[in-house]
Image (cartoon, helix red, strand yellow):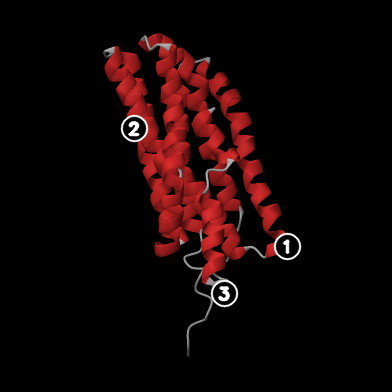
Amino acid sequence: MPLPAATTRPFSLQPLMFENFVCTLSMMSFVALIGPIARLLGLAPWQAGMAVTVGGLAWVLLARRWGAASDRWGRRPILLRGLGGFVICYALLCSFIVFALRSQPPVWLAFAGLVLLRGMAGGFYAAVPATGAALIADHVPAPQRAAAMATLGAASGIGMVAGPGVTGLLAAHSLELPLLITAVLPALAFLVLWRWLPRSSSMPTPPAATSRSATHACAAPWPWPFAPCSA
């Protein structure tokens, strides 16, 4: 007797919403903490600003490359690779900050570590909104597509609002506590996407011109996902 034809999980927007919420919350926690961190490490204001901005610059430079890669290798593999890289880089960033707060390294070393790890995190995370939006374009019918995109943006917006508030409450106990907690959240989002993202498209493949146009549009650094990196 032949196996059932339905071997892939149907597309659902909820995993992408969860990922956008928790990862944006994590990114905004860094923005909320950079002021006190910079004072404790002896960084100049311009150095603190550069540590925040470099994530957005990496996003701008790499978003289209990630989008093109998802055309070639598939949405799920590229989304998970980008998010996996972000999980590792953001955990390293938080660990480096904890190390720096405890050991007080030279200012140049603290600045270099923040810029390098923040830039790497932004570069990897550039894959996530671009490929997530392309997934919506692939799976959601045209009449519902704008609403789905707006819902994804709303999840990111809630993370932007909640991030500084949650971070402020946790930072009342110590600066390390919000770093440790927000380092875990992207890993949780990775597990959710790995478990619930469909392994292949459940809709007919669109014509090449339409697919290319949609991916380039999705790969552009939109204002709502760019904000956590450059705020």
The picture places residue 13, in percent across and down from the top left corner, at 61, 55
The picture places residue 6, in percent across and down from the top left corner, at 54, 76
Q: CA distance from mark 1 to mark 2?
A: 42 Å
Nearest to the observer: residue 134 or residue 196:
134
Task: Estimate how packed mark 2 is, as few (under 14), some (14 to 19) or many (20 or more) residues with alpha carbons within 10 Å.
Answer: some
The picture places residue 88, in percent across and down from the top left corner, at 35, 40
The three-letter amino acid code for the residue at tag 1 is Pro
Q: How many marks?
A: 3
Which comes before the other along the chain, label 3 or label 2?
A: 2
* Residue 168, label in figure: none
Answer whether labels 1 and 2 touch (C-beta < 8 Å).
Answer: no
Q: Is residue 40 visible?
A: yes
User: On screen, 224 above or below 151?
Assistant: above
The three-letter amino acid code for the residue at tag 2 is Leu
> Is label 1 or label 2 in front?
1
Answer whether labels 3 and 1 touch (C-beta < 8 Å).
Answer: no
Q: CA distance from mark 3 to mark 2?
A: 40 Å
Task: Estimate how packed mark 3 is, as few (under 14), some (14 to 19) or many (20 or more) residues with alpha carbons within 10 Å.
Answer: few
Q: What residue is shown with label 2?
A: 92
Q: What residue is shown with label 1?
A: 143
Quadrant location of residue 52? top left
Rendered-image quadrant of the C terminus: top right
Label 2 SS: helix
Q: What residue is shown with label 3?
A: 204
Residue placed furthest toward the right: 143
The picture places residue 146, in percent across and down from the top left corner, at 69, 54
* Residue at figure coordinates x 48%, y 20% from the top left: 33
Label 1 SS: helix
* Residue at figure coordinates x 37%, y 9% from the top left: 42
Label 3 SS: loop
* Residue at figure coordinates x 40%, y 37% from the top left: 121
